[in-house]
Amino acid sequence: RYQQTASPNPNPYSSPHSPSTPQLGVDPFATPTPSYDELPAHSGSATSTYAPAYRAHSPTSAHPLAPDMAHNYDNRAYSNDGHGEWDGRSTKSYQTYGSQAHLDPYNSKQYEMSQFPSVPYTTNPAAGIVDYPPQQPVYNNHGGGLRPPVGGSQHSSSGYSTAREKMMRRRTVRHVELQQGNLVLDMPVPTAIVPAGCTAEEQTHMRYTAATCDPDEFASSKYSLRPYLMNRQTELFIVMTMYNEDEILFVKTMNAVIKNIAHLCSRSKSKMWGPDGWKKVVVCVVSDGRSKINQRTLKVLQLMGCYQDGIAKDEVAGKDVTAHIFEYTSTVVVSESGEVAQGSVPVQILFCLKEQNKKKLNSHRWFFNAFGPLIRPNVCVLLDVGTKPTGTSIYELWKCFDKHSGVGGACGEICVDVGRGCSILLKSPLAASQNFEYKMSNILDKPLESVFGYISVLPGAFSAYRYKALLGKPLEMYFKGETMHGGGSDGAGLFERNMYLAEDRILCFEIVTKKKEAWTLKYVKSAKASTDVPTTIAEFISQRRRWLNGSFFAALHATTFQHRIWTSGQNFFRKIILQIEFWYNAVQMIFAWTSLANFYLAFFFLVSSATANADSDAFRFIGAGAGAKVFEVFLKLYIALLFVVLICSLGNRPQGSKFTYATAIVLF
């Protein structure tokens, strides 16, 4: 049960728009929003209270990302105070009510204003002048609001009393019944984002659910989702994980997903897709941490109708909220420049805002273990915010699963975002080297592994899995690493902790070796996606330290347990092929382990052969026998650089050794 006391205006006779008479806890420029008489009733025994809130009023309500776009319609969830500060308060608030509605719902201090202070001044109604301050209004226990003070007033005949009572009625506390003990609210969205003539509740109301359970207990705790309640068959379930990415990266990925859904709906001759194909696609956005999310990204989600500020609760029935779930079918498209337009197709969006920052693996657990059992998709697509798939990439991935029933996972080609006219490659040699690495991997490694049927890693930034293939041990082993990096005593050793730094490699191995089932992994070259790569040495080293450490131990794990392919459901010929691939990977792992020595030996023999003959000595212009001396200097410099890099690597902050790493790269 939740109750917050309505706080009346301490000075009801002063103008609410007058900045010269500030009021405690009330925005002097605030005007009440249209009231909502009743909320939809839900079955349940427990109840909570609800009160509509105020929103800021200003002559012009502007778009947060495009100041030149003015919106002056009523009942708008977004407003601008005229000084560049964006106000994203929703038209209804569950977090703060009454006089505190204009405060930050996450940082505001709760004030108790049910008791009115006594009047410190005397009034002189006989003179026809109302002294300051006027009499305080009297609380009406029977009418549920405030009635005017006893005695005449110069405002009594001006209609102000009626306006004040109407305002106070909007602040009446209402009760909202919990749905089977869970807080579920259907909140109206601003009319401007609702398509003309649309009356469907999924497009006129946003559904909010406050989850107080662990992701594994979401379905058993009787929580539900709109696609489940509407009994829709979901073919594609797309997840976008983010941490604190800005609105530019979010919009880039979201718009690419919307274009892919529009492409699915444009395939009118397809048996699976068509004009209503959007009903078979659900886009899930999981943000890691309520305090970590970029506020401008939240504004974009507000514009799309997928979020309303002030609704989120910290606890329900004495239980701490673990995730805030917002569901809305949106047709709004926000461009990277901040322009807002109506899209060609609706998109079912499920926005999960986690209360705490628990890393990406926990975000995937909400996706697979909490939402997956209710939605029951055929194919799950994994995306990172910042990755931009091309207009048909998601369809190409899905087609691979549709044509080959034995495919359990697939990935596309990840390209480096080179910028306009390859400007990024020209400006950054580091980005150019990574572009070469990505191309070689997509040309040589991935196609070869796809022929064998086992790809060592499906990149989490852009990959797809068949949901049925993930159930059971693959997901169990995938999420085992979540508890290994929290500082708890889980019994995991050094080997396992390093191995689970690359948990996506573990997932691929578990799918192929799943007991009594025959799943393969495929590479789809026609499915492309671009992503940003580190352009600074510190970011690059931080990324590669994590990748190399996890990939080596994951490869060692796969080599150690390669015998498990013989207990899988693969046919005999496939088992032989997979066994050959595991032997090949073992040899490759040995070369990777000795790569440092191999580079030194190659350098030694090349330079020694170039300086062995005095007649062909490349440094003879310096003097006779100069080549051997220069060779000795190079060898000592090589060894010294190895020790310098080793010492710098013992620390955990590459940002503190940027100059040292840059010098080593140039000298190498």
Image: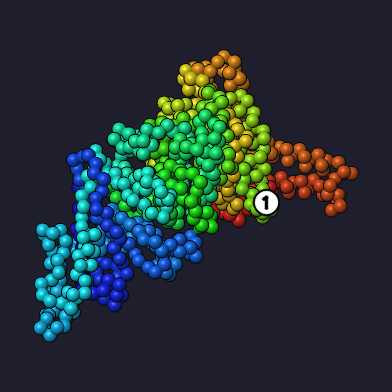
Q: Nearer the viewer, residue 418 or 166?
A: 166
Residue 220 picture location, percent across and down: 30, 32
Which residue is the extreme one toward the bottom?
A: 127
For residue 318, which quarter of the picture?
Answer: top left
Q: Please give the name of the residue rendered at 49% of the width and 55% of the height, measured from the top-left corner.
A: 340
Residue at horizontal 53 percent and vertical 23 percent from the top = 406
Q: Residues within 10 Å of mark 1 (few under 14, many from 20)?
A: few
Residue 367 drawn above or below residue 661: above
Residue in view at x 21 percent, y 39 percent: 44
- Quarter residue 121 falls in: bottom left
The amino acid type, in three-letter code, at marker 1 is: Cys
**Residue 442 location, quadrant:** top right
In the orientation shown, which residue stands out farthest toward the top?
Answer: 572
Left or right position of 31 against 59: left
Q: List x then y, in percent, for residue 397.
A: 56, 33
Q: Is residue 99 left or right of residue 202?
A: left
For label 1, the SS is: helix
The answer to which of 18 and 189 lies nearer the viewer is 189
Instruction: Point out residue 444 in the picture as x, y percentages from the top left corner.
Output: 67, 33
Q: How is the image coloured?
A: rainbow
- The answer to whether residue 281 is visible is no
Pick the residue in front: 579 or 114: 114
Residue at point 67%, 35% (across, down)? 443
The outermost residue toward the right is 615
Task: Please provide percent x and percent y for residue 427.
Answer: 67, 55
**Left or right of 645, for residue 129:** left
Question: Which residue in the protein does label 1 denote?
Answer: 422
Report the front residue among 610 and 483.
483
